[in-house]
Amino acid sequence: MTAWSQTFIMAKREFLERARSKVFLFTLLGLSALIIGGTFVLALIGGEASALQLGVAGDSPPGITQDIEASAAALERDVVVTTYPSVSDATLAVENGDVAAVLVDGSTILATTTPSATTTAILTSAANAGVRRDISDELGLSGEQVAAIVAPVQVTVVELDPDDPDETARLVASFATAIVLLTTIMIFGQFVAMGIVEEKQNRVIEVVLSKARTTSLMVAKVLGIGTLGLIQVAALGLAALVGIALAPIPELGETGLTGIGAVAVAWLAFWFILGYLVYSFLYATLGATISRQEDMQSVAFIPALLILPAYFIVISSVSSGADNAATRIGSFFPFWTPILMPFRINTGSAASWEVVLSVVIVLLTIVLLVRVGARIYRGAALRTGSKVSLKQAWSLAQE
């Protein structure tokens, strides 16, 4: 039997054994329901929109402020309208974020980026109302007569700083991936270590190693439990998408998380898999050095210490931007790369060569962890009782 055949058989056994567990099924269904429910709660909280800040400037028709307020009321939106003495003052207000958009001369919408559909609809409707009223006053026509002969005004949108309309969705997806990666690594990585400890306690590992290679056994553990973990992550991701589809969150923009595109989703999945492999092989190596479940915490904190700094860097980068020294340098550290690099990719701050280099570094790290881990595993797997240090396990593998 080839090494790959051994690995596949043992990985399949690991997967089926744990997939049938009631705890796994309960956790999968419970968390999925919790995520869908949580999305509804977020949508309800975010559904109470605050008053929309708008402005007018230039040669605007009389009564334009009332027209804007009436248009907003028709769309069931609260609005605060500010009149600026000059276009330059209005431009400064838009750039400072004091208002979402300004209607200039009754025909031009001034905004930093593409205004929302609601903002455009309100200002366009108000601009048309002003023109119709002027014509009605000058020609003595009724409102219905004016509406019949006057075509709607075609407004021009001027973007002071064109931006990616899906930027918010990309940030949310990247931040969510960091959280999912962190929690899943902690949970399923410890499952790998606990599985190894259980086999050492039950002496099953002695029988298995008499018929299988050490590397095959360790890789099978990681792949079997890892496949289970990926299925759970996929189910939770699907639950989140279902929740967002049923109860959209306005703060994510008009396109929501679907705006990040299939390519971005593929990148996130790719980095998730690489991150899981890095930490699972590390957990497997550390798990082989202990023989009791009570000693698990003595090794579990090491991967946690390695990954937590990347999590905090992501949190700080959400406000300061992804293109900072900590994020750039950290994205090449293999234990942080799976979290920081997808964050940089989705915020557009990673060059192509940086992505390729980071992938190569992570893949080499995985190969190194497998080789070093297999040797330590071989030296410590048959040792029971007290904890075996990494140095001792390395030396025992030579004997």
Image (spheres, rainbow, N blue to C red):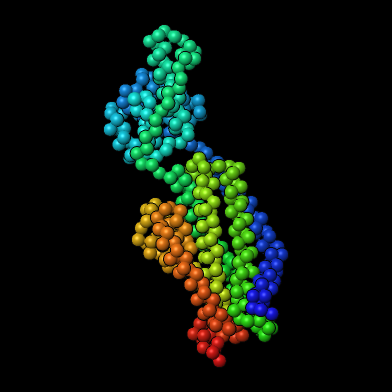
Residue 203: quadrant of the picture: bottom right
Q: 37 or 285: nearer the eye?
A: 285
Q: Is residue 195 above or below residue 337?
A: below
User: How far across and how far down the image is residue 15, in percent?
Assistant: 67, 68
In the visual, does 287 lie left or right of 140?
right
Residue 123: quadrant of the picture: top left
Residue 397: quadrant of the picture: bottom right
Q: Residue at x 58, y 65 (%)?
A: 187
User: How far across and how far down the image is residue 145, in percent?
Assistant: 48, 11
Q: How many marks?
A: 0
Q: Residue at x 45, y 28 (%)?
A: 122
Furthest residue in direction top, as rendered: 140
Furthest residue in direction bottom, as rendered: 399
User: How far across and how far down the image is residue 281, in percent?
Assistant: 55, 73
In the visual, does 337 lie left or right of 374?
left
In the visual, does 22 lie left or right of 244?
right
Q: 4 or 42: nearer the eye?
A: 4
User: How far across and how far down the image is residue 128, in percent?
Assistant: 43, 21
Do we see residue 290 in this rendering?
A: no
Q: Is residue 330 above or below residue 91?
A: below
Q: 192 or 198: nearer the eye?
A: 192
Do we see residue 233 in this rendering?
A: yes
Q: Residue at x 43, y 52 (%)?
A: 347
Q: Residue at x 47, y 14 (%)?
A: 149
Give the quarter of the figure containing the N terminus: bottom right
Give the quarter of the figure containing the C terminus: bottom right
